[in-house]
């Protein structure tokens, strides 16, 4: 008996379908406030010697594209999980550091600890969905996403954080902000175009994922955002063990696990390493396992990304993973994204 796709249509599903609207709302609210412009000026004039990008969970993984953008503009940039930063890397807390802290709620346990440890020493630039949160109140400047309320698993808040961080990177690197907004607007339209075929996508995936026991998500560069977040959201949504890692790391060990019940989703990503990533798909299939490539020209429709500028590709790359969460839920006969043990905001370290 084929899976019933209607079983997945709960609150998490409705949040997924609301993502294009959330992206548009976030885009409409992006504004270069005086505080943001002052931080950008201080960074460009060397008053900040380093940028530390920090967050937890999907908020942390969303920082990968910004980290690469800053490094490509000769900014000394580090990505650090907030839990590691506050206990093991306290030397970063000084006036020469600009901390860009991403937190959907702005009040998770690690963010509250960050504010206590910093005690006003380093500059803090907040990226959050909650304007009255401790993070927002204690930051020198803020970029606000407009995802609205979210039921459980990060989806709207993740893609809107990516959009806000893309725009912020253009501001910090003195790129054209109108072009940035145009690219995000295009991503919102592309996401809607992709999602309108969700039933076809889920139907296709239930066939591809049937009897799968081991799921890996792999990529390189900016695609590490979707890889890391995807590994988290599949576990949260479906209680299905999933691991996200780089394509190179996958060859250093997990390749030995390949079998007919292993599925490897490979993100084609940037042109510089696309041939390497496509080669991994071929090698996985040659070992008798299952693999698919996520790309604009992917053979399978569910893994075919809408055409969009490379700068906003990370926003679109998470969409096939979200379809996987629905397909796995349909196969299991359960509602995707309903928490049984976790909570939306983590308040315990």
Image: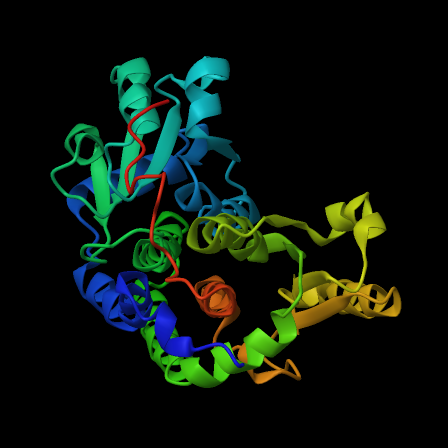
Query: Residue 128: in sight, yes or no?
Result: yes
Give me the residue at 50% from left, 63% from top. 332
Tell me if residue 68 comes above or below residue 194 in the rendering.
above
Residue 158 image offset from top left, x and y in percent: 36, 54
Q: Is residue 333 left or right of residue 104?
A: right
Residue 219 image offset from top left, x and y in percent: 65, 57
On the image, which quarter does residue 105 sit in?
A: top left
Query: Residue 47: in sight, yes or no?
Result: no
On the image, which quarter does residue 135 sit in?
A: top left
- For the C terminus, the image quarter is top left
On the image, which quarter does residue 253 sit in?
A: top right
Q: Is residue 271 left or right of residue 78?
A: right
Instruction: Give the camera-side residue of 221 and 263.
Output: 263
Q: How is the image coloured?
A: rainbow
Give me the residue at 22% from left, 48% from top. 129
Q: How many marks?
A: 0
Tell me if residue 66 comes above or below residue 101 in the rendering.
below
Instruction: Give the camera-side residue of 102 and 250.
Output: 250
Residue 329 image offset from top left, x and y in percent: 46, 64
Give me the residue at 51% from left, 81% from top. 203
Residue positioned most to the right: 286
Q: Is residue 223 left or right of residue 104?
A: right
Instruction: Give the camera-side residue of 261 and 321.
Output: 261
């Amino acid at each position: 008996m084929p899976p019933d796709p209607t079983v997945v249509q709960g609150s998490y599903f409705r949040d997924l379908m609301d993502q294009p609207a959330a992206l548009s709302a976030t885009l409409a609210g992006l504004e270069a406030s005086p505080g943001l412009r002052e931080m950008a000026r201080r960074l460009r004039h060397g008053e900040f010697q380093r940028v530390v990008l920090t967050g937890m969970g999907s908020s942390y993984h969303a920082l990968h594209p910004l980290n690469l953008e800053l490094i490509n503009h000769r900014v000394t940039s580090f990505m650090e999980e907030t839990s590691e930063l506050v206990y093991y890397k306290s030397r970063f807390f000084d006036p020469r550091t600009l901390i860009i802290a991403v937190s959907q709620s702005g009040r998770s346990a690690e963010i509250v600890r960050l504010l206590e440890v910093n005690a006003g020493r380093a500059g803090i630039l907040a990226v959050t969905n909650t304007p009255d949160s401790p993070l927002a109140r204690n930051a020198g400047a803020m970029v606000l996403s407009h995802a609205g309320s979210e039921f459980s698993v990060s989806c709207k808040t993740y893609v809107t954080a990516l959009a806000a961080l893309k725009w912020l990177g253009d501001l910090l690197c003195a790129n054209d902000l109108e072009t940035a907004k145009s690219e995000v607007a295009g991503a919102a339209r592309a996401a809607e175009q992709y999602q309108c075929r969700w039933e076809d996508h889920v139907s296709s995936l239930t066939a591809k994922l049937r009897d799968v026991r081991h799921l890996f998500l792999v990529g390189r560069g900016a695609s590490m955002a979707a890889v890391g977040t995807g590994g988290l959201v599949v576990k949260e949504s479906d209680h299905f063990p999933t691991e996200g890692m780089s394509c190179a790391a996958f060859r250093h060990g997990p390749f030995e696990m390949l079998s007919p019940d292993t599925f490897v989703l490979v993100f084609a990503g940037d042109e510089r390493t696309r041939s390497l990533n496509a080669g991994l798909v071929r090698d996985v299939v040659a070992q008798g396992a299952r693999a698919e490539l996520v790309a604009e020209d992917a053979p399978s429709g569910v893994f075919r990304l809408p055409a969009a500028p490379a700068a906003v590709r990370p926003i679109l790359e998470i969409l096939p993973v979200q379809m996987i969460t629905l397909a796995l839920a349909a196969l299991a006969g359960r509602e995707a994204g309903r928490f049984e043990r976790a909570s939306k905001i983590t308040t315990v370290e």
